[in-house]
Image: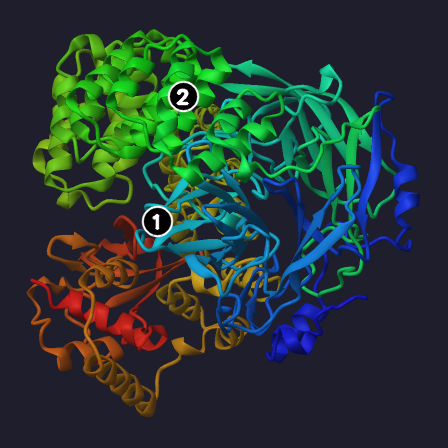
Amino acid sequence: MSRNVPLEEITDNEEIRRYMESFKSMGIQSDSSGLPNPMETLKSFLIPDDLEIDLVLSEPQINQPVEINFDHRGRLWVVEYQQYPYPKGSKVVDIDNHARVVFDKVPKPPTEGVKGADKITMFEDTNGDGIYDKSINVISGLNITTAITWGRGKIWVLTPPYLVAYTDKNDDGIPEGDPEVHLSGFGLEDTHAVANSLRWGPDGWLYGAQGSTTTATINSAASKDVHFKGQGIWRYHPETKIFELFAEGGGNTFDTEFDAKGRLYSGTNEGAHRGYYYKQGGYYRKNWGKHGALTNPYAFGFLPGMALEGEKYRFTHAFIKYEGNTLPERYNEKILSLNPLHNFVWMSRVEQRESSFLCVDEEKIIQSDDHWFRPVDIKTGPDGAVYIADWSDSRLSHVNPLDTWHKASGRVYRLRNKNKTLVKPFDLSSYSNEELIDLLSHKNKWFRQQAQRIIGDRGDKTMIPELSQLLSRGNNQLALEALWAINNCGGFNDDIAIESMSHKDPFVRMWVVRLVGDKREVSERLGQKITQLAVSETHLEVLGQIASSAKRLPAKYAVPILNNLFLNKATANDTENRMFIWWALESKAETGRDALLALFENPQLWNSTLVKEVVLERLTQRYTLVGGKENYKAAIKLFDLAPTDAHSKLLFIGLQEGIRGKDLAFIPEDLKNVISECQSKFGVGKLTFALRQNNPEAVKEALKIIADNKANWLERIAYIEVFGDVYERDVVPILLKLVEDNSNSVGLRLACVKSLGNYKEKEIGERLANAYNHKIRADLDLREAVFRLFASRPDWTKSFLDIIYTSKQIKKEELPLDVVRQFKLHQDDEINNIIGKLWPEVEIATSEQKTASVLKIKNALASGTGNVSNGKELYIFYCSSCHKMNGEGADIGPDLSGYDRSNTNYMVLNIVDPNADIREGYVNYVIKKKNGQVVVGILQDRSEYKVIIKPLGADPITITKEEINTMEAQKISLMPERLTDTMTNQEIRDLFEFLKQK
């Protein structure tokens, strides 16, 4: 029977309740037909002639199966996701247009918190006839649970925000007591995209995925506050307690799959391709506006999913690479992928493309006109058959916030050969060491993977001699299995690593390098061996792993490895390896700065294709973007070492990107000289003078150049800037198109935004407001520039506020309060009415409110101690965009370095009431231009003919007297009052502890 969550249990907030009830649903929501009975659905399937399909389980045995998995005894476990979409006991306090929510509380771990409706059921075929004749409700009362697996004598359950483990010493599948929390911090903003899909990797780590629209800040016994936004693959080591983000990006990652070579994949809901081949340390495509930026701001690039030849249907929820051996031969090593949106299952062959793959669709191996058929998980079983979990619901899309799911249905199907392969009951945990080693040759990958996990459970080093012989003498796959087994039982060492790096099988070499990198330390001789391999290796996947492992190693060893990768011609044109080498180099840009720069003293290195096409621009951008004395010196040295003007020009393009938005006053003179010399040497803009004279032919030619992505980047920038000074209506759609295209460089897009401020067309605000979420939001600099643009004209402000208030496509928290205050400067009733509803805190605080804020801070400071490191992060987030301290930050507000920051009373009063004492030189002026634009900033110069004003977060601009309508000084600071009101007591203590530091 259906157990839908009533709306009153979801939220107490009347506004949110109304919004949920009136939500405009997107995507497929429901089908008018009733639920077909299981046998009707079975009859609806169209399958190839060489296969059969069976109904294995159905309601009422199971409901809403989200994952299926087989344990080492062949028992089938089903995770029933019946609490979805809202955790029991938590209520929604905020929601956006994607139905991402904020809850009033974080659910407690199982047995501590309230009991939800999720459960895990175990099914057993007791006599080996292929029918699951016994079932046990193993764990019930779970609250948002997505995955289960076994290992190390435990039952592992992923129940976001936790990964927990139940003890099961007697291996009967029944937990013995309460679980232990191993990980906490997986986000719950969208339970359609929470952490999921537990799988043991061949390396002994426990892997999982995380979907797109949730965040995570993970803590374990050994890893603290590992934060990432949205999709990716993560892993956890049960012995060391270390948690890592293995690879970042992808689609709505709800799947993990390892193939026979240990490659890791996942499906995706991102457009029409089959999924991602995730490599260690990789950064992959994201929906940037919706899901946030990468954790590494210096990645300067990302990788796509596997290429596709075939039908462009969206989307692949999950897939397996079939290596079970009992289906007809034509299915072996094919990708079998689920499409729950269109009710079918694909089969695609996989072809090598450089160091990744091309998926070529061959046929649909299951098709159905039953719109309740929603395949959501796929696994190969011990019998080599393919098992498919069917969510079984006419509704598929999760974006409707109302719980209208059909919670009384669910099926599991088995796709098999014509002659059913039966497997007698077994228990792999009772196998001897010899029998487990024999399983490493099993033709069904499932048995090999189970054997590897059990070998890891035992950790029996007496197995090493026999495994070592298999490693050196066995066939390629068996040698690889032996290597993994040696590592899993604790026998991997330098001698084995060095010998195996010369193994004939490239995947043995690849995995040796990976296992070495996982240790994050190497001996001198092992480091030298990898360095030698970096120049002699020709297999592209091995080379990519060398780069990934170099990223994890100390700079002493990583830099020589990188040097050889630069010189290895096999890396030059491989799309993915080029980026992995850059990411490895970037990770040593500061920790190995001197060693890296020493490499560039070799003229041969500058002629490397990879260095010219990938490294030079990015490296100077990296150094100048981060800034600081040593990084600026590094950038200058690169220019000094550049052997030709062609190399210097590449460096200069990166430098231009790195210094965008920076105050040039704080750039050292030596670097300014470099910039001046490059501008002179590589200067462009031959049409500039004619443009300023409004020459029609020059205008026509300049517009053509600006729109051409293949034209000279510096020349395009020069003309874009000119059109910011001279009015030319025809440039507006071109500039908007460039801003909306996030494949363009941020520097070019910022130049467009700045110039658009000179125009008054209403479409500017409308188009950029609509583009903000998916095209602008991910880059902080671009986001800030667009905020200022919206604030500069009332029509544009209204367009942006409409996206926030009416359609809720943007969360109000993304806007700095000083921008909101700028919105109010229009003195428009419509704007002020919306601001009053969204940001009541920007109103002038009453005396009572200020007093309450002061008391809150003082009580917080008196009740505990602060953490300097956490305080620095808070300072960066809340303060550094306006204030400089100890040489770091911006100069919009007073430099805090010289203040007596240990004077708590003084600091408290100025934070709570910044309007009480606005320092001279930091008064903001509002200039309303005759063209309708509003500019807010600090006056830097003023004469009879012009003013120079520095807007918040932007470069100074010159405005002539003829352009100005009014100019007024503001009595109110743009710094928000009561800044700490939204902070916790601990955050207040942390911030003040950092402020006290000298």
Q: Residue at x 18, y 42 (%)?
A: 664
> What residue lies at 35% left-to-right and 35% top-to-bottom?
299
Judge left or right: residue 605 versus residue 32: left
How far from the left and from the top, in percent, is residue 242? 34, 46
What is the three-letter code of the residue carrying label 2? Leu
Q: Secondary structure at mark 2?
A: helix
Position of 425 relative to 814 (above/below) = above
Judged left or right of residue 562, residue 690 is right
Q: Secondary structure at mark 1?
A: loop
Q: State the image coordinates of residue 529 (x, y, percent, origin top left).
A: 23, 15
Camera-side mark, 2 or 1: 2
Q: Which mark is residue 467?
A: 2
Q: Residues within 10 Å of mark 1 (few under 14, many from 20)?
A: some
Q: Residues within 10 Å of mark 2 (few under 14, many from 20)?
A: many
Q: x, y (%) of residue 60?
A: 81, 58
Is residue 959 at least partly visible in the picture?
yes
Q: Which residue position holds label 1? A: 241
Q: Residue at x 75, y 51 (%)?
A: 134
- The disc, 2 or 1, on the residue closer to the chain's N-terminal end is 1
**Residue 318 coordinates in the image, percent (x, y):** 64, 37
Q: Which residue is at 42% across, 26% downward?
A: 484
Q: Is residue 527 above or below residue 258?
A: above
Kindly indicate whether the residue at mark 1 contacts the one at mark 2 (C-beta within 8 angstroms): no
